[in-house]
Amino acid sequence: MMSSSPPPPSLPTGGASFFFRGYTKLCKGLAVILLLVHLLVQLFPSAVTYLALIPGRTIPFAWNLITGGYVELTIPGVIISIIGLLLFGKLLEPLWGSKELSKFIFVVNFSASLCVFITAIAMYYITEEENYLYAPLSGFYGVLSGLLVGIKQLMPDQELNIFVLKIKGKWTPSLVALISIVVSFFVKELVTYLPVILSGIYMSWIYLRYFQKRLETGLKGDPSEEFSFSSFFPEFIRPVLDPIASIFHKLLCGRTDRADARGQTLDTTPLPGSDSIEANRRRERGQRALEQRLAEKLAAVKSAEGTSQDASDKV
């Protein structure tokens, strides 16, 4: 019988060394791209026409399905995107690796932009308002919300500090979606970001749930109950959502067979208890990565303290 793993250790909250250290090359490179693109559109406003997602011009400018996610038009927007990318990437890249994280960012950015494009076209045909076709849509928020879904999957019990709130990783995507919906009713300027955020959450869940290849098993997706679609919602709503979600589950993977290491074909129906075992494995991987980073931070702090002490002794 597998014993439940202890909760992952809390990240150090004191000192600026944790905030400014440990960022990966991939995330720092993407942060530089976000900053440079922001400066470009500020210096040359006409560049927005070619880089941002404008549904009425996506054909033939199809590349804006990719570039639109990297265009931040406001200073607060680029600051939030860079900080979120660095912090969330620092948590996920040690668990996924640079290759998988870059693939995840590309898939979520493109698929979220595609969803926003289809939504805008549909809204135009419903309302016949040309604003849906020619209003520039951009922002890295789809990827940021998708990274929160990755944290929900790998570190569901890790507490994260969101402004003045402390919330477990498994609830961060739901909280961001709820706040975005509520705020959009009062701040019209934020309505354009809502489809990006919601699409980023949903498409990242689709990718992680059904398509991401797990290196430790060679299988695709995450069939655990803790990562089901209804897990994004409060428990009293789940009995209503589960039957609906099961229809899409069968469409996506109900007829798929998987092969084990011996070359035998296995049915996709998870064995009893396999969901909880997979969830424990994810928590253990997250715990090991967090412990390793914590040890590195503590070693760096002790080294800095030792250096300063030696300097004072010499004086």
Image (tube, grey):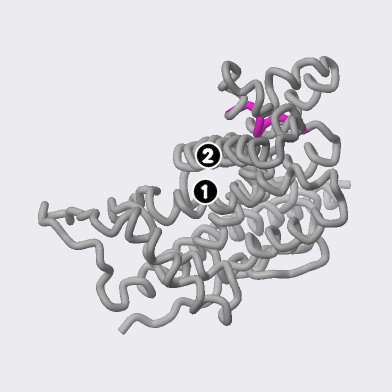
Residue type indicated by callout 2: Ser
Magenta stretch: residue 69 in it?
A: yes
Magenta stretch: residue 194 in it?
A: no
User: Which of the pair 180/274 is nearer the observer?
Assistant: 180
Expressed as whole percent of the image width and height from the top left, the position of residue 47 reads 75, 17
Q: Residue at x 74, y 69 (%)?
A: 166
Disc ID at residue 111: 2
Q: Quadrant of residue 32?
A: top right
Q: Which residue is mark 1?
A: 203
**Residue 90 visible from this viewpoint:** no
Q: Quadrant of residue 56?
A: top right
Q: Does residue 64 appear to the left or right of 193 in the view shown?
A: left
Expressed as whole percent of the image width and height from the top left, the position of residue 17 reads 75, 51
**Residue 262 visible from this viewpoint:** yes
Q: Residue at x 52, y 70 (%)?
A: 231
Q: Does residue 115 appear to the left or right of 15 in the view shown?
A: left
User: Which of the pair 210/254 is nearer the observer?
Assistant: 254
Expressed as whole percent of the image width and height from the top left, the position of residue 240 reads 51, 75
Q: Secondary structure at mark 1?
A: helix
Q: Quadrant of the N terminus?
A: bottom left
The reply to whether discs 2 and 1 touch (Cβ–Cβ < 8 Å) is yes
Expressed as whole percent of the image width and height from the top left, the position of residue 237 reads 57, 77
Task: Bin the neighbour count of mark 2 within 10 Å (Cα to Cα): few under 14, some 14-19, many 20 and up.
Answer: many
Q: Does residue 257 appear to the left or right of 263 in the view shown?
A: right
* First to last magenta residue range: 66-72
Instruction: State the CA–CA distance, disc 2 to disc 1.
Output: 7 Å
Residue type indicated by callout 1: Met
